[in-house]
Image (spheres, grey):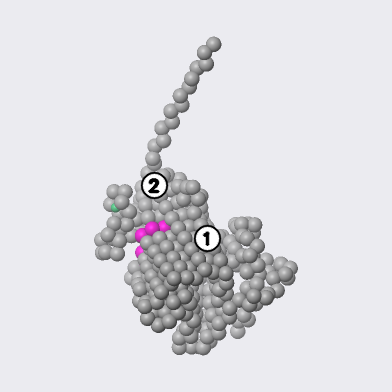
């Protein structure tokens, strides 16, 4: 008997969902369409959890952003094969970022966590926000507000429970600091994790072409773990820190910068790869910079093609990692709690390599005592 042959024909329709103007998310919601057209700001507020599925294109049809406040959470987790894309295409013609850097640019405002110029601060009880395997293009921080010019693609203020990992962030732009990412502490200590991102070809018109890390008030610390990233071809157009800028402006800024590739970045004034500075007397910068490849970075004026350490107007203390350290100490409950400042609650420790955990331990073991 002849076997019957079956031909299965499956038709896959591209789905596109258009959001209605400004959208407030205060309950769990999921973006799962192939393309989500954003036609107003998205505000994720108390009780809101926005999940974005792998492969979704979040297409900004105007100069809008995604804002988190209160206990709002964003879970944008793509996969390596199926990344999420955040990009701007105002006229919807499928060509993204047209006329970027002109007045009629197709741009979007980025993901803004605790941007109090516009919405409320993050709540201490908010659970973790995760942004991974997502591509960011044409984010632009050029708002008129005080801090709206910081962090072209992602801005984090006074919040630690974030993980930004395995993303590609390219062609983003800030008018002031942090061409693609700005992490900032004003009222509470900020930790968090930037890991395995590709940070390429971003521009700041001020300082920090790629990533900016800032503490702004006395006794407040801003100390993310920056690990395994490639930070290349970024440009700080009018100030310092082509790849990364670390600055204390009164507070403490003590990031761990390990296992990154930092190449071909340029700063107009000092620190082509990395600029570390303490602007005001009493501020402290104790960066650990270890096991990075820092090469082919450039400065136009001043020194520090690779790294510039600048004390600015104040007294600065700088510590670099000592090669001998007491990593072998057991993890106490207290240390676990401290480690959790770096690694969001949802994360599993075994997602991190031993070296990273050891770096965190090491850092915790030698934390400066605050006054
Ligand atoms: Ca277009």
Q: Is residue 31 visible?
A: no
Which of these two is toward me, 329 or 219? 329
Residue pictured at 61% horizontal, 76% vertical = 321
Against 269, residue 18 (above or below) is above
Front residue of 331 and 232 = 232
Q: CA distance from mark 1 to mark 2?
A: 26 Å
Quarter of image, res 43: bottom left
Q: Position of residue 41 (x, y in %)?
A: 38, 58
Residue 27, horizontal then vertical, whole percent: 49, 52
Q: Tell me where the magenta segment starts and ends, as one range.
A: 136-141
Magenta-colored stretch includes residue 328: no
Residue drawn at (37%, 61%) of the image = 171
Q: Is residue 138 magenta?
A: yes
Provide the residue designation for mark 2.
35
How many marks overall?
A: 2
Residue at image mark 1: 196
User: Which numbered circle lies on residue 71?
Assistant: none
Q: Residue at x 52, y 66 (%)?
A: 260
| Quadrant for the N terminus in the image | top right
């Amino acid at each position: 008997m002849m076997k019957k042959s079956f031909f299965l024909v499956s038709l896959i329709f591209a789905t596109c969902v258009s959001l209605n103007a400004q959208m407030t998310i205060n309950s769990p919601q999921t973006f799962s369409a192939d393309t989500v057209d954003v036609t107003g700001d998205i505000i994720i507020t108390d009780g809101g959890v926005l999940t974005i599925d792998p492969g979704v294109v979040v297409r900004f049809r105007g100069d809008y952003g995604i804002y988190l406040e209160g206990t709002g959470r964003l879970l944008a987790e793509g996969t390596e094969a199926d990344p999420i894309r955040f990009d701007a295409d105002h006229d919807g013609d499928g060509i993204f970022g047209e006329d970027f850097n002109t007045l009629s640019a197709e741009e979007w405002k980025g993901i803004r966590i605790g941007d109090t110029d516009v919405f409320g601060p993050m709540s201490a009880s908010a659970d973790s926000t995760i942004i991974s395997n997502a591509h960011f293009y044409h984010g632009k921080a050029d708002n008129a507000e005080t801090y709206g010019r910081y962090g072209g693609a992602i801005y984090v203020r006074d919040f630690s429970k974030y993980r930004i990992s395995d993303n590609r962030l390219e062609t983003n732009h800030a008018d002031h600091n942090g061409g693609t990412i700005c992490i900032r502490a004003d009222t509470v200590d900020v930790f968090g994790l930037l890991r395995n991102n590709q940070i390429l070809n971003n521009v700041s018109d001020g300082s920090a072409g790629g990533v900016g890390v800032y503490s702004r008030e006395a006794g407040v610390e801003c100390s993310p773990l920056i690990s395994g990233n490639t930070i290349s071809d970024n440009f700080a157009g009018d100030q310092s820190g082509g790849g990364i800028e670390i600055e204390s402006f009164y507070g403490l800024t003590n990031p761990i910068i390990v296992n990154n590739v930092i190449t071909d970045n340029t700063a107009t004034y000092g620190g082509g790869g990395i600029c570390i500075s303490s602007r005001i007397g009493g501020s402290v910068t104790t960066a650990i910079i270890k096991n990075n490849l820092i090469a082919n970075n450039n400065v136009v004026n001043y020194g520090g093609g690779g790294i510039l350490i600048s004390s600015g107007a104040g007294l600065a203390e700088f510590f670099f990692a000592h090669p001998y350290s007491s990593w072998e100490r057991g993890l106490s409950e207290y240390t676990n709690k401290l480690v959790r400042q770096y690694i969001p609650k949802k994360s599993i420790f075994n997602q991190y390599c031993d070296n990273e955990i050891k770096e965190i331990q090491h850092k915790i073991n030698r934390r400066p005592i605050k006054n």
